């Protein structure tokens, strides 16, 4: 207990360093409150009190009715007396399990990746740095994300599990909570603006006292994204883009209010379904796609392929698209040895790189010295037929 004044002093120093990023919303003789300025993310808020931080996740899963409350207080001090249904977490966290590969780049850039002790389906990790920690036995394999090895996770006994949910129902998370392991839900994947997803780094950073680092990282990426978007804002000639490909006879394309559609808009690309109101994906037949986007200049498939020949062998109707005929088809690819894809792992943190890729593909003269990072053009030297 002798350490409590020192811990509170350090904790308040961290708050002070963030004060220009907050707005004071209430003051009382016993508690002062300020809310962090979250600019793009809509799914969470952070409120700083004198001796604890209150995080509200207002959009933890689609159509969620409830708000999740997390109270972060200095480790080894008493829990704050707060009359709300909340998960209490002593910070800074010293060991963590995450369940989405999108969290791994954030841990790395915050320089807390050494605190990761477990992950489900480690084969999908693309980061070579974290893959090495898996190989060295420092990150435990926890089985399938939908069926986590609870026994192994309980044995790890991490300070925190950062999970995600599509329905709000997860028996594993409930069991972990009853066992005394706090679980928090990351809803970043529901954000509709690319920078909104990135801003969830401030949510993660709060559990590790890395708020300043997170703010710096986010502001740097935001500046790069906006500067890049400004380079094409005034262009009047826009290339047309076709995303997606068939999966079991259904062609999924991003809805007009989705974060991917926002990318296309910011890259000054013309998108056939930009006027639709869906935030998720549209499910279409190939005939519907041909009707609206057969002559699209660019096609970015969701397949991880290397050649037009591979694409043609999946479905010969693909040759009906102008982009295929002109050999202007792109795909994501994995730079490392894992089974996952860098685009899905790092893309949430680095929307500036996705935007640059799209601009490079759609307007090659704008970024003449830039090399594609997440996408590659399918091999044109192979006869597709």
Image (cartoon, helix red, strand yellow):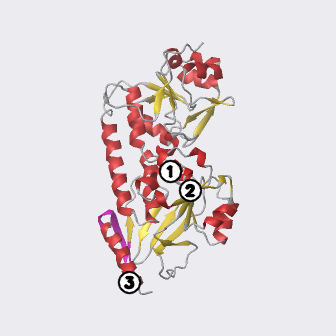
Comes first in the chain, label 1 or label 2: 1
Residues under numbered marks 3 and 1 in contact, where contact means CB atoms less than 8 Å apart: no
Magenta stretch bounds: 19-33
Residue at the front extreme, as displayed: 136
Residues under numbered marks 1 and 2 in contact, where contact means CB atoms less than 8 Å apart: yes
Is 25 magenta? The answer is: yes
User: Label 3 vs label 2: CA separation?
Assistant: 34 Å
Relative to 342, say whether 381 is above or below: above
Q: Which residue is mark 3?
A: 5
Camera sees residue 247: yes
Tell me which residue sits at (37%, 52%) in the image: 218
The quarter of the picture where residue 255 lies is top right
User: Label 1 vs label 2: CA separation?
Assistant: 8 Å
Q: Which residue is mark 2?
A: 139
Instruction: Name the spot of residue 144 as percent of width and height, x first.
Output: 67, 51
Is 112 magenta? The answer is: no
The quarter of the picture where residue 365 lies is top left
Is residue 348 toward the left or the right of residue 33 in the image? right
Q: Secondary structure at mark 1?
A: helix
Is residue 322 toward the left or the right of residue 210 in the image? right
Comes first in the chain, label 3 or label 1: 3
Quadrant the C terminus occupies = top right
Tell which of 91 and 244 is nearer to you. 91
Name the mark on residue 130.
Answer: 1
Q: Residues within 10 Å of mark 1 (few under 14, many from 20)?
A: many
Instruction: Name the spot of residue 345 as percent of width and height, x first.
Output: 51, 45
Tell which of 294 and 163 is nearer to you. 163
Instruction: Name the spot of residue 374 as percent of width and height, x first.
Output: 46, 35
């Amino acid at each position: 207990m002798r350490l409590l004044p020192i811990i509170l002093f350090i904790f308040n120093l961290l708050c002070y360093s963030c004060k220009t990023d907050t707005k004071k919303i209430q003051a009382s003789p016993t508690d002062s409150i300020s809310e962090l300025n979250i600019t793009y993310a809509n799914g969470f808020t952070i409120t700083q009190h004198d001796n604890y931080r209150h995080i509200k996740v207002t959009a933890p899963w689609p159509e969620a009715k409830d708000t999740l409350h997390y109270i972060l207080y200095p480790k080894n001090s008493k829990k704050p007396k707060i009359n709300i249904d909340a998960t209490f977490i002593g910070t800074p966290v010293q060991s963590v399990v995450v369940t989405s590969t999108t969290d791994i780049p954030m841990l790395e850039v915050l320089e807390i990746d050494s605190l990761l002790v477990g992950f489900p389906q480690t084969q999908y990790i693309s980061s070579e740095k974290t893959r090495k920690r898996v190989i060295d036995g420092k990150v435990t394999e926890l089985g399938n994300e939908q069926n986590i090895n609870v026994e192994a996770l309980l044995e790890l006994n991490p300070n925190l599990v950062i999970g995600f949910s599509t329905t709000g129902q997860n028996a594993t998370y409930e069991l972990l909570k009853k066992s005394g392991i706090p679980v928090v839900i990351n809803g970043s994947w529901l954000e509709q603006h690319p920078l909104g997803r990135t801003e969830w780094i401030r949510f993660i950073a709060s559990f590790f006292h890395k708020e300043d680092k997170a703010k710096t990282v986010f502001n740097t990426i935001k500046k790069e994204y906006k500067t890049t978007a400004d380079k094409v804002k005034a262009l009047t000639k826009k290339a047309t883009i076709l995303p997606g490909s068939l999966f079991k006879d259904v062609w999924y394309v991003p809805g007009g209010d989705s974060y991917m559609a926002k990318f296309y808009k910011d890259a000054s690309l013309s998108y056939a379904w930009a006027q639709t109101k869906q935030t998720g994906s549209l499910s279409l037949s190939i005939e519907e796609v041909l009707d609206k986007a057969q002559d699209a200049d660019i096609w970015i498939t969701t397949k991880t392929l290397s050649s037009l020949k591979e694409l043609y062998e999946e479905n010969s109707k693909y040759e009906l698209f102008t982009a295929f005929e002109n050999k202007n088809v792109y795909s994501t690819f994995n730079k490392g040895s894992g089974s996952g894809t860098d685009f899905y792992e790092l893309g949430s943190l680095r929307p500036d790189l996705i935007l640059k890729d799209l601009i490079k593909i759609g307007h090659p003269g704008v970024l003449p010295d830039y090399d594609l990072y997440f996408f590659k053009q399918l091999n044109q030297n192979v006869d597709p037929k």
